[in-house]
Amino acid sequence: MAFLCYSIFMTTWWILLVIYLLIKTRQIKSLSEQPIINDQSALAIIIAVRNEEDDLEKALYSVCNINYRNYRIIVVNDRSTDSTAEILEEFASQYPLLTVTTITTLPDGWLGKNNALYQGYLSSTEEWLLFTDADVEFHPDAVSKALSYFVKNKLDHLCVLPHVISRSQALNGMLGTFTLMMLLQFRPWDVSNPKSSAFIGIGAFNLINRTAYKKIGTHEAIRLRPDDDLKLGYMVKKHGLRSDALSGEHYICLEWYKSISQFINGLMKNTFAVTEYNLTRTVVAMIITFILFSLPVPLMLIFGTLTIRLMAALILLFQIIYMLNPALPNKWWHALVIPFASILIIYVVGRGAWLTLKQGGIYWRDTFYSLAMLKGRS
């Protein structure tokens, strides 16, 4: 009887969840649909780079050729040891709008990327600041459309959700589940509502005006946050400023990670920060994820009666419907991966917390930061 009640509950939950997400994701406006206005105020595009030789040329070429008149690019080379410096030198000689700032030492009490972005800000005077990553490719009209939307809606901060791809089809399947969980946690459709607690920030595209950036305390206020992009969005909402999010499919693109192993190692360093280094919150999140995402379909299919197995098939059908949502870059078969992907995410979150506690901190770009120090700047 208890198993039947659980099965009914999970079937109902998944049906309602998919209906909810189908409605809400359609409320996220698309960057591609925004008009371009003539008012193009001064913009500084700030990029922090460290050992980015694999993706840097392609990304820089796209950002150096956007359809925007009044902008410049500030690239901050943060102690790179590969051929990044040579690539930057070549681009700076070809594109006068690109300037390079080189960092040779990391000041105490800063994460490298956060310091690099802050140094880029100090080198700027422009009214608009776009913080972006060194592996992002821009459609030529992406920035113009984003700034038009920004100005028209009198925003202080705009995040554009990138179109994330990977050369690994297995990882693409995992990203379908990861995106689902991120949508539920951060609710980008509610970010523009000043009465909502929803916030979001993305390293690929955080656009903010200079006044708002100074008001939230700049990157100095989040200088030891591994999740600096998310925290920037949080600080904007915390200070009562206007924020919003757009979908950037085919306009803001990046290959976030190239393999599942990169995905695991990359996320493991900052997932504990999202729960403010709170072990109880982390464990609760892992248990809920297991119960809601990992367990239902396999458990119901293997041990259920015919009725319960039909419920499992109904859950799977709605998961496929979600993955086929045209607002998301997923494929139908990504639904089949949900139980395995959620277990992998649980592993990443759990191991990330365990390593942080075991080490008493994290290693970030070859520098160790104690947990006491990280909590002190949370």
Image (cartoon, rainbow, N blue to C red):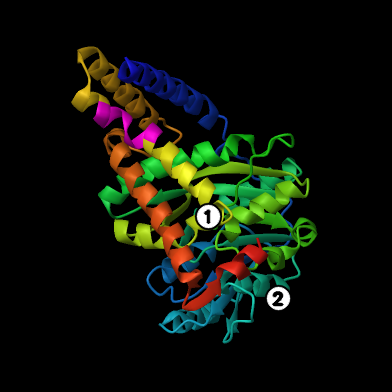
- Image spot of residue 70 (x, y percent): 69, 62
> Tag on residue 115?
none
- Image spot of residue 88 (x, y percent): 50, 79
Q: Residues within 10 Å of mark 1 (few under 14, many from 20)?
A: some
Q: Image quarter for residue 92?
A: bottom right
> Tag on residue 140?
1
**For this view, does 69 lie left or right of residue 174?**
right
Which residue appears at 78% of the width and 62% of the height? 214
**For this view, does 23 lie left or right of residue 235?**
left
Q: Secondary structure at mark 2?
A: loop
Label 1 sits on what residue type? Pro
Name the residue furthest front: 1
| Residue 253 is covered by the magenta coloring | no
Is residue 259 in sight in this rendering? no
Vertical order, 93 against 209 (above or below): below
The residue that mark 2 highlights is 123
Looking at the rendered image, the quarter that the C terminus falls into is bottom right
Vertical order, 72 against 20 (above or below): below
- Image spot of residue 206 (x, y percent): 61, 55
Magenta segment, which residues? Answer: 291-299
Magenta region, main secondary structure: helix
357 or 73: nearer the eye?
A: 357
Q: Secondary structure at mark 1?
A: loop
Q: Image quarter for residue 227?
A: bottom right
207 or 271: nearer the eye?
A: 271
Which residue appears at 73% of the width and 40% of the height? 153
Label 2 sits on what residue type? Ser
Is residue 274 in sight in this rendering? yes
Q: Could you give the CA–CA distance between mark 1 and mark 2, rounded to whole angstroms?
A: 25 Å
- Image spot of residue 152 (x, y percent): 73, 41
49 or 276: nearer the eye?
A: 276
Which residue appears at 52% of the width and 24% of the height? 23
